[in-house]
Amino acid sequence: MPTTSAIPPLIAAALGTICISFGINAILRPEHALSFFEFDYPTIEAEQNLVDSLLTVYGIRDIFMGIAIYATAWCGSRRALGWIILAVGAVAVGDGVVCWRNGHGEWNHWGYAPLAGVVGALFIGMGG
């Protein structure tokens, strides 16, 4: 039986807010967002423009993930929400792999995967 507790929607709101915050940061402060990947911000203007554009795409992705979490938490099923949160965890793993290939910074991303895995699995188990 699905729970009527207010806690699961609050957890979903927190995760959605984290994603949206990272996205806004990437769009408005690309140099700062790049530091989460432990890459150096380029000094050549053309390279800065490219990195800024790519971080805008990254930011839009993160904002989408946050909105997907919000929308599913309040309009969809808990099971669907769980799968979306698991997918967000997979994105964190992928981002970490990019850092790992660069030699450092992977745990800035991999640390979110277990949280997303546990929370996603709990929502899937709640059903509804």
Image: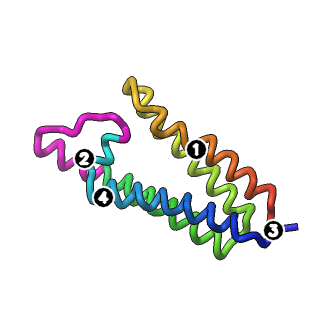
Q: What residue is rendered at 42% in x and 26% in y?
A: 101
Expressed as whole percent of the image width and height from the top left, the position of residue 62 reads 45, 56
Q: CA gap, disc 3 to disc 2?
A: 42 Å
Asked if residue 30 lies in the magenta stretch, the reply is no
Residue type at numbered disc 4: Ile
> Which residue carries the number 4 mark?
27
> Which residue carries the number 2 mark?
31
Which circle, 3 or 2, is nearer the viewer?
Answer: 3
Residue type at numbered disc 3: Thr
Q: CA gap, disc 4 to disc 3?
A: 37 Å
Q: Earlier in the sequence, mark 4 or mark 1?
A: 4
> Which residue carries the number 3 mark?
3
Q: Residues within 10 Å of mark 3 (few under 14, many from 20)?
A: few
Q: Earlier in the sequence, mark 1 or mark 3?
A: 3
Whether residues under marks 2 and 1 lie with C-beta atoms below 8 angstroms apart, the answer is no
Q: Secondary structure at mark 4?
A: helix
Q: What residue is rendered at 62% in x and 66% in y?
A: 10
Whether residues under marks 2 and 4 lie with C-beta atoms below 8 angstroms apart, the answer is no
Q: Secondary structure at mark 1?
A: helix
Vertical order, 47 against 25 (above or below):
above
Residue 90 circle label: 1
Expressed as whole percent of the image width and height from the top left, the position of residue 32 reads 28, 47
Q: Which residues are magenta?
A: 36-54
Which circle, 4 or 3, is nearer the viewer?
Answer: 3
